[in-house]
Amino acid sequence: MKLPHLLPRIRTSLFGLLLATAVLPFLTAQTKVEAPPLVLGTAWYPEQWPESRWDADLDLMQKAGIHMVRVGEFAWSRMEPSEGQYDLDWLDHAVAAAAKHNIVTVIGTPSAAPPAWLTQKYPETLRTKQDGRKDEHGNRQQFNWADPKYRELARAMAEQLAKRFGHNPNVIGWQIDNEYADVSYDDATKAQFQASLKARYGTLDNLNARWTTSYWSETYSNWDQVPIEEQYGNPGLLLSWKRFVSDTWRSYQKNQLDVIRANSEHQFITTNMMGLFDGYDHYTVSQDLDLASWDDYVGEGQLDPYRNGIAHDLTRGFLRKNFWVMETQPGFVNWAPINNSLNKGEVRAMAWHDIGHGADAVSYWQWRSALNGQEEYHGTLVGADGTPVPLYDEVAKLGAEFAKAGPALAGTSVKSDVAILHSYDSRWAINWQRHNKDYDPVAEIYSYYKPLRDIAQSIDIVNPSVPLSQYKLVVAPGLNVLSEAEGKNLIAYVEQGGNLVLGQRTGMKDIDNALQVERQPGPLVPLLGGRVEQYYALTAPVPVGGSWGTGTSKEWAELLSAKNPDTKVLMTYGKSNGWLDGQPAAITRKVGKGSITYIGAWLDEATMKNAAKWMTDASGVTPKFGTVPEGVDVYPREGEHGKIFVLVNFSNAAQTIPLPSAMQDVLNGGTTRSVTLPVYGVAVLLVSK
Ligand code: GAL
């Protein structure tokens, strides 16, 4: 480490200064700030304020129990004011000033906001929008993610940062770029896409066959004839473009990640993703990261703990370990149709809901609004005058609670008996051809997630290629695209005693988004001993009845057949379009100790609840905690030393919850057999081993 980099940090104490020339390693150790197990953080933009103001901000952060600032992710014009002239001293000062307040730093690489000189000098780095027009300077994300020159410049910037801060003990991690989203449709990118097709398919004959391009005379005789299509086009082409987009985000990220890794140690690398956003395949992009993180915004309305829970569990599934909430709203945002605030107490409740789902950090965007710029109205923790807004005290309470509960939660993670399978290929494939405009694949996942979560109190959402043997129950709603390997994984799971439930539209397509010749569920038809004979989009719900009571199917109904004598019919359709009348709507087959079930109906909430009860009973899944009143969420985390249960009351009345055994009350102290939670109340309970 070079002396100039150390100096700002050792200014933190006179004692340090005296020792500066003699015992440098000792000094580094002295000034190192430890991140606590539960991190409360905020996005901070020191470049927007005079250095003389920083201390006051950091002091207020420290008083609120904030231990992390994320800085730099839009500061390229400050870091490199002109080409090759890097100025990082201010950032070094900011990291040191934060450390003085016991605050660690995560540095964002600034590639989401290239400076004006850059795009002016290298216009090819600007992305081309779908209508063929070039983007321009003045907002952000105007760059072309596939452009080699842009990558070269972004890498050089990241390298400067990594060389300067890669060994700084108070920089604990890196965020690459910010919310990958916009892509480019220029000719050079199209040529890269065509080259990627050649690499994947080898020959045009192969591509033509797998995309069935004899249809509508789409046959290609040259790679450069293949267009870019995003919405309406050959399904194989649509899926291939999305794969290219995902691979290109991965290589875009790797371009910076490699140079950071080569110049750093003991620092994680992440990027802030966007929950249920499906612009690229997050499994593809996250595989090179150390940590998954996401930006959790409610926007208009109040928190829906189930929908948000899905996004948390999905993000936790990217690397199948704890994650960070890198950004979340301090009350309200500025981009929704109505930017209402979360209610008093809801921000704190939401933070505990985040932790319960496996987050180890919650970081507010942002600390203080820039006095000008596009986001003046967004929620903050301090106002334009630099003093706290009303929400500050609630966040400070959270800071104190994180400090108290941190030791108990350290090293704990979420362990689930139930997994929901999710793939981007499937979501895209359904969205491109919904067949019923109201068929939303996320809503389909939600319809399973809610009742299963209520029973199991913990769900993993994972990709169908991961090992599944740890789960008692695996549910695949809308797993439309199924690769051969994924099919084999599911078959092996059942044959080894697992319980698999397939939902509507599962196993219909292969990896080229072509129809599976076995019909649904494709390679699982023999194991199921039945299949989908026909699907019907519905204009109105149709009746269903059987083992799970009587109810309806909405949006969609699949007529099933049970060919194998072992395959039992669980539900049948009532009178509807004639085709469905009296036909199987759900079937199941026992396979050794395991089972496979197919549900062809989109069940109403009450019937789905019964179905979830049946699924969990049949697979031996029990609640991780025990019964809780409706509207109270319970989040189990487990570690070497015991179990932790976070309880949050999202109902609109106070609730008293008897505990299944005596538990330690982590926030209030003592041991208790019941807790009473006001609206948005939180309890953190520990059962030591
Ligand atoms: C995020 C973004 C932040 C800020 C925030 C406002 O999507 O990463 O930079 O714009 O939204 O809600």
Image (cartoon, rainbow, N blue to C red):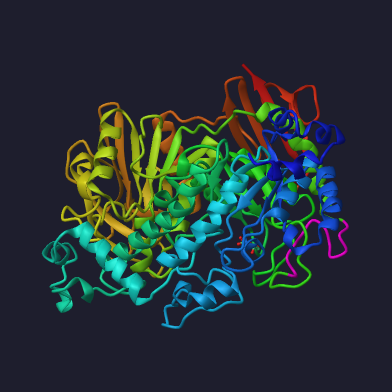
- Between 499 and 403, the residue placed more toward the observer is 403
Whereabouts is ligand 1, in terms of quadrant?
A: bottom right
Q: Relative to 97, is 46 above or below?
A: below
Q: In this rendering, does residue 630 appear at all?
A: no
Q: How many marks?
A: 0
Horizontal side, residue 160 vs residue 513: left or right: right
Instruction: Locate residue 233: give its quadrant.
Output: bottom left
Residue at x 22%, y 57% (from the top left corner): 200
Figure quadrant of the C terminus: top right
Q: Inspect the magenta stretch and tell me whether residue 378 lies in it.
A: yes
Residue 117 position, x and y percent, is: 58, 74
- Residue at the limit of the structure toward the front, as seen here: 21
Horizontal side, residue 679 vs residue 558: left or right: right
Residue at x 46%, y 32% (from the top left corner): 417
- Between 491 and 105, the residue placed more toward the observer is 105
Q: Relative to 544, is 181 above or below?
A: below
- Between 35 and 162, the residue placed more toward the observer is 162
Figure quadrant of the N terminus: top right
Residue 123 position, x and y percent, is: 48, 77
Q: Inspect the magenta stretch and tell me whether residue 7 lies in it.
A: no
- Residue at the limit of the structure toward the top, as seen here: 689
Q: In this rendering, does residue 295 appear at all?
A: yes
Q: Main secondary structure of the magenta part?
A: loop
Residue 550 position, x and y percent, is: 42, 50
- Between 11 and 283, the residue placed more toward the observer is 11
Residue 279 position, x and y percent, is: 44, 62
Horizontal side, residue 118 vs residue 171: left or right: left
**What span is colored magenta in the figure?**
376-387
Q: Relative to 670, is 346 above or below?
A: below
Horizontal side, residue 524 vs residue 376: left or right: left
